[in-house]
């Protein structure tokens, strides 16, 4: 793929990442002066049947439009182009110069309560916009959150819904379905794992990021209470009652027990004893330069077929509404 030119315009330079859903490349745009860098995401359905391809194409169109709208926010990469070529789907996005949050949150490093609250608030300010657009991110984790070099702001990448394309299939009854759960174990709450993500599923993921930041532990190092399904983390770190209550509510196993919207949560954080330190929409620019990534976690995005009967619920707020039966 390297050095291949797509659409006679986007020249692939190198691979940035390869996940279960597709491959991400660094490319340059040959049509613009100075050939600026861009990011090309390639994806295709695993099921090769033509009827699946047509449904995938419709889904791709729909989701590309949503990504384009999201990209109007300065803290989400802009979508420059989307197209199909050679049976593959491509998204061309703005290249964000910076680094991902695994450079700020990694095993053995603990952020203070105020640093954690500040970081989570920065993430939530962008997530608020995403939810206002009726979109659930579905794959929030340190690897999918970047810190932009130019202004130190958080940028959310790698939105989950487009990944459903990979899992599209046709059942034996001829019905098209996307019975997959997009997300990453450890950051993905139980309702999302059975294909029913909600807005508060993203809040769960942000809570888990906060716990990683405070404890200096990876999500997969933390135990879960077998009887309640709750993550056990407070034995790992000294934390104020107020913050532990907020985080516990964010990561409640039962979605109805969580904060239901981002605004409510931001208000809670403002009410902590660190509130006077809390910037409104102002980034934290770390005083240190990101070094080598000490923590390439083994956690990759994943999907699976929970149950062929268990078609994901389609509510108005869901990212896409591909025809599902
Ligand atoms: N817009 C972007 N600007 C700069 N770098 C990016 C951008 N998008 C992705 N990257 C880099 O490429 C890496 C992989 O991209 P991405 O997160 O989109 O896919 P992935 O996690 O490898 O795959 P999957 O889709 O299976 O989750 C990211 O961790 C990030 O370092
Ligand atoms: Mg990713």
Image: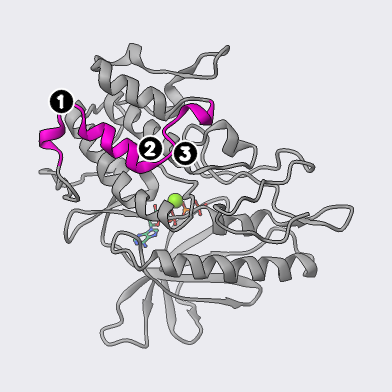
Q: Residues within 10 Å of mark 3 (few under 14, many from 20)?
A: many
Part of the protein shown in magenta: 254-278
Quarter of the image with the C terminus is: bottom right
Label 1 CB less than 8 angstroms from ligand 2: no
* Depicted 171 relative to depicted 29: above or below: above
Quarter holding residue 320: bottom right
State the residue position of label 2: 206
In this rendering, position of residue 215 left or right of residue 322:
left
Q: Position of residue 216 (x, y in %)?
A: 29, 26
| Ligand 1 - quadrant of the structure image | bottom left
Return the residue nearer the eye: 113 or 20.
113
Dot placed on the residue nearer the N-terminal end, 3 or 1: 3
What residue appears at the point 44 percent right and 85 percent down from the top-left corner?
9
Dot placed on the residue nearer the N-terminal end, 1 or 2: 2
State the residue position of label 3: 200
Return the residue nearer the eye: 268 or 62.
268
Look at the image and say whether residue 272 sits in the magenta stretch: yes
State the residue position of label 1: 273
Q: Nearer the viewer, mark 3 or mark 2?
A: 3
Q: Position of residue 90 (x, y in %)?
A: 53, 71
Tags 1 and 2 touching, CB below 8 Å? no
The answer to whether any part of residue 192 appears in the image is yes
Give the Cα distance between marks 1 and 2: 20 Å
Return the residue nearer the eye: 259 or 91.
259
What residue appears at the point 36 percent right and 77 percent down from the top-left corner?
28
Dot placed on the residue nearer the N-terminal end, 3 or 2: 3
Give the Cα distance between marks 3 and 2: 10 Å
């Amino acid at each position: 793929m390297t050095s291949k030119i797509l659409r006679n315009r986007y020249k692939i330079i190198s691979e940035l990442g390869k996940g279960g859903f597709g491959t991400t490349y660094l490319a340059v745009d040959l049509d613009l002066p100075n050939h600026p860098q861009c990011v090309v995401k390639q994806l295709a359905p695993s099921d090769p049947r033509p009827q699946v391809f047509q449904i995938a194409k419709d889904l791709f169109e729909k989701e590309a439009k949503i990504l384009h709208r999201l990209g109007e926010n300065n803290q989400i990469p802009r979508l420059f182009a989307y197209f199909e070529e050679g049976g593959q789907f491509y998204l061309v996005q703005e290249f964000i110069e910076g680094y991902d949050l695994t450079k700020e949150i990694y095993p053995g490093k603990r952020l203070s309560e105020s640093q954690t609250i500040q970081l989570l608030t920065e993430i939530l300010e962008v997530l608020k916009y995403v939810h206002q657009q009726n979109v659930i991110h579905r794959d929030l984790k340190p690897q999918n959150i970047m810190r932009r070099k130019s202004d130190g702001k958080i940028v959310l990448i790698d939105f989950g819904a487009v990944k459903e394309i990979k899992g599209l299939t046709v059942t034996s009854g001829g019905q098209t379905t996307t019975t997959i759960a997009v997300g990453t174990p450890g950051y993905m709450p139980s309702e999302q794992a059975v294909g029913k993500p909600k807005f508060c599923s993203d809040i769960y993921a942000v809570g888990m990021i906060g716990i990683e930041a405070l404890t200096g532990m990876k999500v997969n190092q933390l135990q879960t209470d077998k009887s309640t399904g709750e993550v056990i983390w407070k034995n790992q770190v000294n934390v104020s009652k107020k913050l532990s209550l907020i985080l516990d509510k964010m990561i409640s196993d039962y979605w109805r027990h969580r904060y239901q919207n981002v605004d409510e949560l931001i208000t809670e954080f403002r009410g902590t004893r660190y509130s006077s330190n809390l910037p409104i929409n102002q980034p934290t620019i770390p005083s240190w330069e990101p070094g080598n990534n000490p923590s390439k976690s083994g956690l990759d995005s994943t999907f699976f077929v929970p149950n062929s009967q268990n078609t994901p619920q389609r509510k108005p707020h869901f990212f896409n509404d591909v025809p599902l039966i």
